[in-house]
Amino acid sequence: MMDQNKRSDILGSLLTVGDEILLGDILNTNAHHIAGVLRAHGFRLQRVVVVEDAEEAIALELEQLTAQSRFVIVTGGLGPTDDDRTKWAVTRAFALPMAVDEADLQSLMARVKDRGGEWSDRLGRLAQLPQGATRLAPGRPMAGFSLEHHGVPCYFLPGVPHEMETLLREVVLPDLMHRFPQRPACCQRVLRLYGLMETEINDRLSGFDAVAYGVKVGYLPQTAENWVTLLASATDAEEAQRRLNAAEKELVLLLGEDHVIGRDDESLEKVVGTLLRQRAWKLAVAESCTGGLLAARLTAISGASDYFDRGFVTYSNQAKSQLLGVPEELLQRYGAVSRPVCEAMVQGVLERSKVQAALAVTGIAGPTGGSTQKPVGTVFIGGAVGTRTVVEQHHFQGNRRLVQEQSVQHALALLWRMLRS
Amino acid sequence: MMDQNKRSDILGSLLTVGDEILLGDILNTNAHHIAGVLRAHGFRLQRVVVVEDAEEAIALELEQLTAQSRFVIVTGGLGPTDDDRTKWAVTRAFALPMAVDEADLQSLMARVKDRGGEWSDRLGRLAQLPQGATRLAPGRPMAGFSLEHHGVPCYFLPGVPHEMETLLREVVLPDLMHRFPQRPACCQRVLRLYGLMETEINDRLSGFDAVAYGVKVGYLPQTAENWVTLLASATDAEEAQRRLNAAEKELVLLLGEDHVIGRDDESLEKVVGTLLRQRAWKLAVAESCTGGLLAARLTAISGASDYFDRGFVTYSNQAKSQLLGVPEELLQRYGAVSRPVCEAMVQGVLERSKVQAALAVTGIAGPTGGSTQKPVGTVFIGGAVGTRTVVEQHHFQGNRRLVQEQSVQHALALLWRMLRS
């Protein structure tokens, strides 16, 4: 949907230099990071371009992008080797001579000497910059410089993600904020939803007038979870926050509070952890087809030891009997992927671990192991909280990894529902 | 490094249409997929451009890219809603009228009727295409069409990844291969390496003459693993394969066979699984700080039930004592993150599970829980194969997730080394 606030954003462009992205070796995660950081501060990318490490291609794009944008960010091609061409492309595009900063050269030579390294002309190239350029991190071992061209600030960052992120946060963003004080203030919110399909969300939100609220509404499907995103912008931060709050309140009403798992970074495992911690309860889990993924999701949260006690990855039938006390008769009669076995697993966890909450998952993740009666994607999920036990049967679509991820997500959602009711 | 084979590749461009990428909501995984598939078939992207869902911006890029490229692929903006502008941009860029395919319209109406849906003008728009365009999947519920402009084939694909992937594989790639029979034949190889740092790899490969072998060598760091990639191209497939094999043989000699985990998709968990299966051995694992991630990596492989028996996620000290028989005295005296406890864990797994191989991991993943003596990132990894037991101490850098992933990778590598020796 179109957003009337867009027009007041400060529009910039990003140029990514790198053969490895064009050849499909790596994902352009830098572009994703930069886009997100800019958006959160009232700037917006109108164009992202990826070109190879070739002087002509980089120079051509630099000319075009500086003519179209209020600012330009470039990543990659700043290393000392022959195929790092970015700064040469700058001298070409902006008709500038290459210059050497003496202070820079001295500090570089000192650093090499300190480390016992040998000086070479190749290293000397690192101290070369197009005339008029300013180093972004003088005296620190990171490439990166900025330069103004016809009033458009251009920032050249290394392609190494953590260096790029550091310079973006410490130097580029403050400089942009200083240059463009009139940009809109922005607030963002993610509403994480469970139990509503995309079409249901569309239906429930069809009457919502985003323009009247001064927000932009987005929609992002996740694995067994849907996200509705809200972006409010206004001339000042207070007004943006007010718009966001008003819009969020209305959206939650339309979608139904019961479907809202959490906000922003409140993942299911985090929300479930908070509910357990509030009750001073412990959780233990038993997994077959998810093979440890459920425990791994829970323990990805720092501080999970407050409520997560243990996990059993009972992959073989023998493990199910020995560790959880699942009767062999049940396994033989119904098979490992069955409602009775799932129930016995979750009961076994509860009894043997002295916890207040338990989860169990058994299913066929595929691609092999399916049958007509129990096709690949058949998964039983059991939850036990106090004296209540629930076992659900699911039929998931997708490959092995997707079946495992959906199983984990629905197991966490089952516990979430049981803890709330 | 420059590659003389590049020049003979068929060069194309990719245009991604989508606000959600420019706003940092999602990663451009489509671009990554398309680049990789094209490369494997002798095509190469020279430019990737991302623009917003706006007719003018899309039209402008279409004009530029068709003038520069042998072929153009466009993804996104093909849906039925008002903000899907791609086909309107095509009519504008190529000065074509919009046309309705009658057969298409009928099949669409029949599909809607079958599902009991209501017909609307909005749905009718789905049957509109720029004059001269050909639907990529006639009669199937997927948007996507192709069109030739001044002899340059242009393919318009939906942004939904699985639809895009299907059409790329089934329609676009065969069409490109038919149109450009003279392209070079390509073969690729990934060598997965363990135990060599980037600088060591550089040193060992410094004498390797890629140009003489007719290959391109790339380098991709992974978590606790490094990949060296080889791309051979030649006028025919046999010659490309010959070049690849010769180059690979030389590279393995230079790098050292001992450091090669596997090739292409042979991940550590897969290679370890194969070694266990060959011996008809079973494996069980115990995890503390990795919280199930090690078991999850092992069971991500289909058929892991042949050799993976069970996993213990002993997060609490009580779980370590009860499930693995770790003496409480050891836990109190040395702490849960210590060499004696790790050794007791791996012994406990071995004794209680009747398996031939066992792994145990205990450490501090952070961000909390560290101390001066045992800082965050301190991890003990134990391996037991038959009567041999090895415990290693590591100090990993990075955030919680990185410490967990490095721990898993090094645990698998320990087992790999023990199984081979």
Image: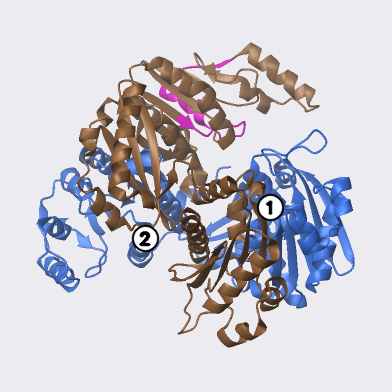
Chain colours: A blue, B brown
Question: Where B167 falls versus A421 (above or below)?
Answer: above
Chain at numbered mark 1: A
Residue pictured at 76% horizontal, 56% vertical: A318
Front one among B84 and B259: B259
Q: Amino acid at mark 1?
A: Thr
Q: Is residue B33 left or right of residue B277?
A: left
Q: Which residue is mark 1?
A: A290
Quadrant in the rendering for residue A51: top left
Across and down, in percent, residue B268 comes to: 50, 51
Front one among B115 and A310: A310
- B93 in magenta: yes
- Seen as rendered, the residue at the extreme front is B387
Chain at numbered mark 2: A
Q: Residues within 10 Å of mark 2 (few under 14, many from 20)?
A: few
Q: Amino acid at mark 2?
A: Phe
Q: Which residue is mark 2?
A: A180
Across and down, in percent, residue B347 comes to: 61, 70
Quadrant of image for the N terminus of chain B: top left
Question: Magenta part of the protein: which range?
Answer: B74-100
Question: Where A46 falls versus A154 (above or below)?
Answer: above
